[in-house]
Image (cartoon, grey):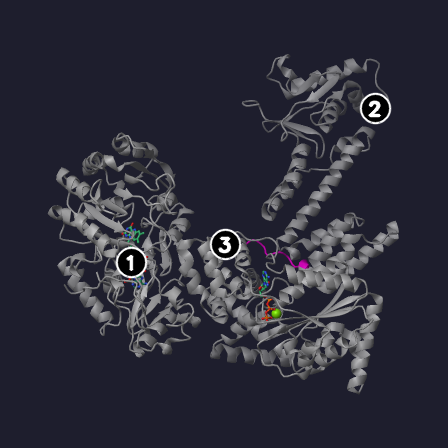
Amino acid sequence: MPESMPLPRPLPAVDAAALRGLAGGAVHLPGDPLYDEARMPWNLQVDEHPAAVAYPADPHEVSRTVRAAAEAGLRVAPQGTGHGAPPLAGRLGDAVLLRTSAMTGLRVDVAGRTARADAGVLWGDVVTRAGRVGLAGMHMSSPGVGVVGSSLGGGVSWYARRHGLQCSAITAVELVLADGTFVRATEDHDTDLLWAARGGSGGFGVVTSLEFDLLPIRTAYAGMLAWDWQHARRVLTAWGGWTADAPDEVTSVARIFQVPDVGWLPARLRDRKMVMIDAVALGDAETGARTVAPLRALRPEVDTFAQVPASDVAHLQIDPQEPTAVYANSVLVHGLPADAVEALVASAGPGSGSNLLFVELRQLGGALARPAPRAGAMDQLDGSFLVLGVGLDVGTGWSAVREDARRVLDSLAPWASRASYLSMAYEAAARRGWSPAAYDRLQRIRRAADPHGLFVAPQSGAGD
Amino acid sequence: MDGQPHLHLHVLGELTATRDGEAVDLGGRRQRAVLAGLAMQRDQIVPADRLVDCVWGDHPPANANGALQAYVSHLRRRLEPDATARQREGVIARAGPGYVLRLPPDAVDAWAFESAVEAAAGQAPGEAVCTLDTALRTWRGPAYADYAGEAWAEAEIARLAELRGVARERLLGTRLELGEAQLVIGELEALVAEDPLREERWRLLTLALYRAHRQAAALAALRRARQVLADELGVDPGPALRSLEAEVLAQSPDLDAPTPPSVDRAVELVPRPRTPDGLVDRDREMAILREKLDELEQGVPGCLLVEGPAGIGKTRLLDELRRLAVAAGTWVRSARSSALEQDFEWGVVRQLFGAGADEALARDERYAVLRGLCEVTTHLAEEAPFVLCVDDIQRCDDASLQFLTYLVRRLEGLPVLVVLAMRTGEPNRADDLAELVADESVILVRPAPLTEQGTADMVTERLGRGADAFVAACHRMTSGNPLLLRQLLRALADEGVPPDVAHIDTVRAVGSRAIASLVTLRLRRMPPTVTTVARAVAMLGPTADLVSVADLAQLSEEDVASALDLLARSEILLDGHPLDFVNPLVRDAIHADVPAGERALLVERLGRRLKSSSSHPSQAGVPTQ
Ligand SMILES: Cc1cc2nc3c(=O)[nH]c(=O)nc-3n(C[C@H](O)[C@H](O)[C@H](O)COP(=O)(O)OP(=O)(O)OC[C@H]3O[C@@H](n4cnc5c(N)ncnc54)[C@H](O)[C@@H]3O)c2cc1C
Ligand SMILES: Nc1ncnc2c1ncn2[C@@H]1O[C@H](COP(=O)(O)OP(=O)(O)OP(=O)(O)O)[C@@H](O)[C@H]1O
Ligand SMILES: [Mg+2]
């Protein structure tokens, strides 16, 4: 990933003045009072100076913005929240950053158990709205993540081992192509684009709406267990064994967490180094309690398990909500044998010297290991765990953070899968995000929808 | 009382009882009187001799106490047939020198009724209507109907009847609050006919008529009330009716129904204020208004000029002034200039004085007219000091503006407070205006942009307590302009956006639109009939009303009515009448957004309408009396 240092950059030479007045006036050019605010993504590590930032509010305005950008010789980079901004770093100088936050429409169809979310909708909105009528969406761990960006990227939710990737739940996508035309892609029409939207991560248009299935989940047995990180080896070994025969109804995440003393973290954990397990089990409390009993038997210091409304699950995992500068990278691994736990603890645990905020192991498998019933660019994940390293700049600079993460991920190389989950692996070669056949098809679809490369590609090293 | 059979005593009507829904035979009238006497005292002990009084009045039998005991034990056997004699002390218990009824509060309909009326007072309108309506349905006739006219029952019967009257008034009053003005008029007429001396009923009736856009009938109702009270009691209407009369005449915005709760999906999610939004950040301005009103009461004249950019809150300050004036019993005469009427000579003056200006306006020479109008003002001021309020004078017709300038220079000794509002930053052509602004006796009031705290208060009111960063974004995006802020918050509320840190970019996205496009965007997100109706209202201008809008939009009046309702709830139109947009900018935005084809069609229909109706556009905006 190109390192992005907060160095002042010269203003782009290109002229985006032609875009002024579009999107009801919600276009900000360099020098405008709101430009600096509007160009910043959720991940503040990315500090780009696009030629313009536009906030169109409906497909019509999107289309006009796309056409105007093309006419002005600019490129277009669609962006929702900017949680997934890192791959864009260094590539926006001649682009219009087309932010989708004004498209806030959200409809939940109770009878059909579906949702229609416009491109500016966040997972927290879906969770709240669907929760009111006893439904749940396959939301990401943080409620502030955008529905569209995360769905295009696959989407591993707390219900993934039972119900698969969020992108496989997509039933229709509406988008504006590079020539400004509007398309609604379904199982019957423009099926290629629907296929691409299911995990193809973008580069074929500006998505304006997604329709996807919801799940009839009212409550779940969910909670967190935490120990001092001295227990990391014992706990992770036991957890690794437990995951091997855990039912698909349960999805869990283990983390080695070096909790800094910052406001968004729970006070009782602040300034501590912990090993934690979060888990969500579908079904009733009794079954859930039976499932996680072996983990609770490891005598955690904190135990918050309870049967909770499904909407609480969106707040289970501790993630920063406010815009934050974070570095993240991940690998997919097969299995978690004792040696792997050993390697992990040695590189991220006590005495490792790692300053990462956390290293996370997401339990995959279950439905994620089987091809989804609905065909899509991404329809399964090749690996039984996703290992993610996340760091904040703790004063030692980003290269030190990156080095810490590299050390952890490299230590797991013997177990690594050939695949990468690109939504959380920004430095991996784009090819590794899909099967070779899917990758080729995706490229063909992108070329057809965007023959002149108007859209900034979602991944930086597209070809390698 | 778990596991016990459910015993219910009914006294709202003839006295009866049911046990698990089955009627209980309570015996003869005298025996039942024991129960009546006990029920009236609720959980108080009723001395035996008082019960004797209830049963036999002035003619008790020789062994009255013994006979009473016999009635009691008969009643116990009927009320608790399954219990042994000793256990039967449960419902009618012996206590000290008498007896007490031991029943849960909901077992006696009169008790339940009373607590329902109390409970309703603390409930939200929708719920209160339900509570009151249910409670009133438990009445099957006059309370303790079998004992009407008996001295011991009289007070309680009267008390319950009074309570029922209050409950009926509150029910209709609450339905009125919920926007059902049309529907309650008939019932209010009936209530008034039943007891024309209850002023509350006249008040509600007047309010309902007013809100149903029947101002003349509202004023007539007030006259009828005045007449009845004078004829029957020889008194004047009380303060409530008197201030209502002043409000009706002043068309006070306070009279408008509060926004009814919405059934719309997204709006449902947002806590909705029941009163018009609180005014924020205007303490200083309000202090000036209060001071000038106080001085006016002392006979001191004055002139205030509220000026500032579009949407800063000038009209709102005039509304607040009207509210204060009405509360103080001071008369207000208001007018509002509009672009449509700018070329209509004396338009504003006509709005101010109605037919009262006719004679003066008929004079040939301009100065004679001005002098005449000053005389009209003087006559009115001699009756009582009053406020003369003109909004948007930057668009006032030249003649009226000349009068206002002329008047302001001659206020000395005249108990009149002239309050003018002017939008700045627009080209205006009149010299008189410049002269007015420069006049040293004119006090300038310049409402400032809202502070971050004021913004926070409005966010809380619309979306719930906002995260600091969310509020800060709202403040930055709107630069403290209240119109922009309210439209932004409405747009966010329409989509159910919560005010948390995750949604800051939503604020940026929606809030960085120009106000006009923000308004049209909001409109585009509403159902198509609503857009059509809003466009028709914008095209019609001040002449718009339900019928003309329906005609122009070619929709049924029902559809138009519900679209108008949604538009008012969405803060596009003002809630109330005459039909008007919350702000001229909102109207202009919608007007400019009408697509060419539709515009041509509407203009054509409008032309046909004007030809077929005799109404001259000059009458537009003059409130019908
Ligand atoms: C705190 C945090 C928690 C996370 N939790 C999870 C998790 O639990 N599971 C998981 O799978 N992932 C998770 N992620 C990763 C997340 O799914 C990706 O970062 C995703 O890209 C975010 O989508 P977004 O729309 O919010 O971000 P954005 O940065 O706005 O979008 C990411 C990319 O998607 C594309 N895109 C977005 N909107 C459009 C559009 N309208 N049209 C076309 N292309 C578009 C663009 O290429 C854009 O660069 C998490 C990330 C963070 C930072
Ligand atoms: N201090 C305030 N607190 C809360 N709301 C306010 C305040 N001032 C104005 N508003 C609201 O903001 C909106 C715009 O105000 P208003 O119509 O009074 O502006 P104006 O200055 O008269 O604009 P114009 O020049 O377009 O006539 C109204 O809905 C009004 O109720
Ligand atoms: Mg105004």
Quadrant including the N terminus of chain B: top right
- Is the distance from the Cβ of mark 1 to the nearest ligand 1 atom less than 8 Å? yes
Label 3 within 8 A of ligand 2 by Cβ: no
Q: Is mark 2 within 8 Å of ligand 2?
A: no
Mark 2, residue position: B57
- Is A259 situated above or below B437? above
Q: Mark 1: few, some, or many residues within 10 Å (few <14, many ≥20)? A: many
Q: Which residue is mark 1?
A: A84
Q: Is residue B25 magenta?
A: no
On the image, the x and y values in percent for residue B97 come to: 75, 16
**Ligand 3 quadrant?**
bottom right
Q: Earlier in the sequence, mark 2 or mark 3?
A: 2
Please give the chain letter of the residue carrying mark 2: B
Give whichever of A376, B67 is nearer the camera.
Answer: A376
Q: Residues within 10 Å of mark 3 (few under 14, many from 20)?
A: many
Residue occupying image coordinates x 15% and y 64%:
A440
The reply to whether discs 1 and 3 touch (Cβ–Cβ < 8 Å) is no
In the rendered image, residues at marks 2 and 1 fall on the same chain: no
Q: Is residue A382 visible?
A: no
User: Quadrant location of residue A122?
Assistant: bottom left
Mark 3: amino acid = Leu
- The answer for how far apart the CA atoms under marks 1 and 3 are is 28 Å
**In the rendered view, does B11 fall on the left or right side of A90?**
right
Residue assigned mark 3: B463
Q: Give the residues drawn in magenta, as a range.
A: B254-267
Identify which residue is drawn at 76% across, 57% down: B243
